[in-house]
Image (cartoon, grey):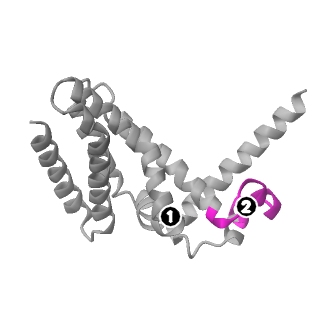
Amino acid sequence: MDRPNKNVARGEATRGQLIAVATRMFAERGYEDTSIEAVLREAGVSRGSLYHHFPSKEALFEAVAEDMETSVGVQTLAAADGITEPLAALRAGFLAWIRLAGDPVVRRILLIDAPSVLGWERWRAMEEDHALGLIRLVLQAIAEQGKLRPELVGTLANVLLASVNEVALLVARSDDREAAMNAGADAIDELLQRLFA
């Protein structure tokens, strides 16, 4: 009875190890310059173990990107933790995402390589899976306060996600990330104030 549980745990540990090693290597070298062989050597696992979990290098990268999206989601939620006013919570989450865009690992994997490796549509769908629902929930609360017409919640959630992602991309590609983060934060503040003042 205990054996299948050990095999599952071992499989999950191997999968986690592969994602951790690949995350570091993709961040340092980029997708194109990271070989499966290098990941195998670094992780100390067999090719069969890797392909048991990930049928291709792209599938491994997608798992890394999903893992990173989850981590970013946790951090943006944590930034809004304890904030009861919906607009302030939205602002805190957006500013956390803009700051995270300056992190070299997030920048390389989610904002530089993911759109080209996964394709624009898959990358966009991933962003929507992780962020769009949360934005909609906050906008619904703002609508319930009478600061937004309820029929605009869905469309405006997409507009705001696109806006904050564009700011994140500007930060990621900037030579002066600190200045870009500050300008992006100011722009998001201005946008939210004008929308909901």
Q: Position of residue 152 (x, y in %)?
A: 25, 39
- For label 2, the residue is 55
Task: Say what amino acid the circle numbered 1 marks.
Answer: Ala
Q: Is residue 95 above or below residue 150?
A: below
Between 8 and 195, the one lying in front of the other is 195
Say if the magenta span includes residue 47. yes
Residue 158 higher or lower than 166, as above or below: above
**Foreground residue among 183 and 162:** 162
Q: Is disc 1 placed on a helix, strand or loop?
A: helix
Which residue is pictured at 13% across the width and 37% down the height? 196
Chain-order first, disc 1 or disc 2 = 1
Q: What is the total number of numbered labels drawn onto the structure image?
A: 2
Crowdedness near tag 1: few (<14), some (14–19) or many (≥20) residues, C-alpha within 10 Å = some
Q: Position of residue 73 (x, y in %)?
A: 43, 42
Residue segment shown in magenta: 40-58
Horizontal arrangement in the rendering, residue 164 relative to residue 39 (left or right): left
Marks 1 and 2 in Cβ contact (< 8 Å): no
| Separation of marks 1 and 2 at Cα, in angstroms | 21 Å
Tell me where residue 44 appears, x and y as whole percent.
75, 60
- Residue farthest to the bottom? 33
Indicate yes or no whether the magenta region holds residue 193: no
In this rendering, position of residue 58 left or right of residue 138: right
Q: As shown in the figure, which amino acid type bears the numbered disc 2?
A: Pro
Farthest residue, direction front: 151
Q: Secondary structure at mark 2?
A: loop
Residue at screen point 72% across, 44% down: 13
Q: In this figure, which residue is indicated by the disc labeled 1?
A: 27
- Residue 132 vs 116, above or below: the answer is above
